[in-house]
């Protein structure tokens, strides 16, 4: 019962803030709504008993990505005045495409025999996660380090001062 | 709540993100829509992992979150670079590749 209430309130927060992200006129407000949507997703992870992922989500997404986007807005727009307003174009066509996609996927999901109850957890999930990353999935983990390094070098290269 | 509820919620958030990507004129707005879509995919991964009782999906989600963050950093670096060259971040005006 408590889970149902938590799920529905999180769903309302998530869908409402996601709509605000794509419809808000002020770009800066969009980013703040995105922070709320990402925090709501962390709540959904908590509901699914993935505490470690909820923490990662808060630190990396709501902390990292939102900060980067705010920096990008400060660099490319004036925070006060006309420039920060943004508009949508072809709203009808976009809504038709998005609604058709959602209708297709929801219809597909509703016809599948999906599990209604969870499998019981056998071990501590965070422990299993750490062990998996450093044993069975150590190669993707190392590759991820290379990807991070490449992304950092690329970002520094792009952002270098003009000579 | 069953798996179906989580998948439906993720599908709706994905659709909203798709709407944002299609309709936004500002490049940063488009990137925000992409972030929403990636986020919805992560909800799917965690929900499937939890309901099947396997931790592999959660490990995959950790990787997916890291890659998304790298993507956001690179995307915004490109936006800032484009702004330097063209003095605009409106997608309609960024037609450098047009012959």
Image (cartoon, rainbow, N blue to C red):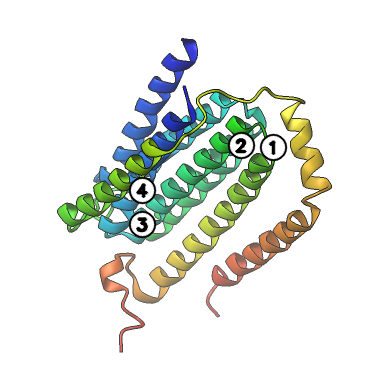
**Residue displayed at 77% across by 46% down:** A133
Distance in Å between CA atoms under marks 4 and 3: 9 Å
- Is A140 situated left or right of A79 in this image? right
Q: Are marks 2 and 1 in contact (CB under 8 Å)?
A: yes
Q: Is mark 4 on a helix, strand or loop?
A: helix
Which residue sits furthest right? A135
Residue A26 shows in this picture: no
Residue at numbered disc 2: B49
Between marks 3 and 1, how big is the CA–CA gap? 32 Å
Name the residue beneath numbered marker 3: B30
Circle nearer the N terminus (2, 3): 3
Q: Residue furthest top?
A: A1
Neighbor class of circle 1 (other Cα within 10 Å; few <14, some 14-19, many 20+) is many
Q: How crowded is mark 3: few (under 14 residues within 10 Å), some or many (20 or more)?
A: many
Residue B55, which numbered label?
Answer: 1
To the question of a shared chain for discs 2 and 4, the answer is yes
Tell me the CA gap for discs 2 and 4. Answer: 23 Å
> Position of A161 compared to A30: left or right?
right
The disc numbered 1 marks a residue on which chain? B
* Chain-order first, disc 4 or disc 1: 4
Nearest to the eye among marks 4 and 1: give it. 1
> Is residue B83 in sight in this rendering?
yes
Q: Residue B17 carries which label?
A: 4
Question: Which dot, 2 or 3, sits closer to the camera?
Answer: 2
């Amino acid at each position: 019962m408590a889970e149902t209430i938590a799920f529905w309130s999180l769903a309302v927060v998530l869908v409402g803030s996601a709509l605000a992200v794509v419809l808000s006129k002020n770009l800066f407000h969009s980013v703040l709504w995105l922070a709320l949507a990402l925090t709501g997703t962390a709540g959904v992870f908590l509901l699914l008993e993935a505490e470690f992922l909820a923490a990662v989500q808060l630190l990396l997404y709501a902390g990292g990505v939102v900060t980067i986007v705010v920096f990008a807005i400060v660099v490319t727009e004036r925070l006060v005045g006309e420039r920060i307003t943004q508009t949508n174009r072809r709203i009808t066509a976009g809504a038709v495409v998005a609604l058709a996609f959602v209708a297709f996927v929801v219809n597909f999901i509703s016809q599948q025999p999906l599990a209604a109850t969870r499998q019981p957890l056998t071990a501590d999930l965070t422990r299993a996660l750490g062990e998996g990353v450093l044993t069975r999935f150590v190669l993707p983990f190392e590759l991820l380090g290379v990807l991070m390094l490449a992304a950092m070098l690329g970002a520094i290269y792009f952002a270098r001062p003009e000579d | 709540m069953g798996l179906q509820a989580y998948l439906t919620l993720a599908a709706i958030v994905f659709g909203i993100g798709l709407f944002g990507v299609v309709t936004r004129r500002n490049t940063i707005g488009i990137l925000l829509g992409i972030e929403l879509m990636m986020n919805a995919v992560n909800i799917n991964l965690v929900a499937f992992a939890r309901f099947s009782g396997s931790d592999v999906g959660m490990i995959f989600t950790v990787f997916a979150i890291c890659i998304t963050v790298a993507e956001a950093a690179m995307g915004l670096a490109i936006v800032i670079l484009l702004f330097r060259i063209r003095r605009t971040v409106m997608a309609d005006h960024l037609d450098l590749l047009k012959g």
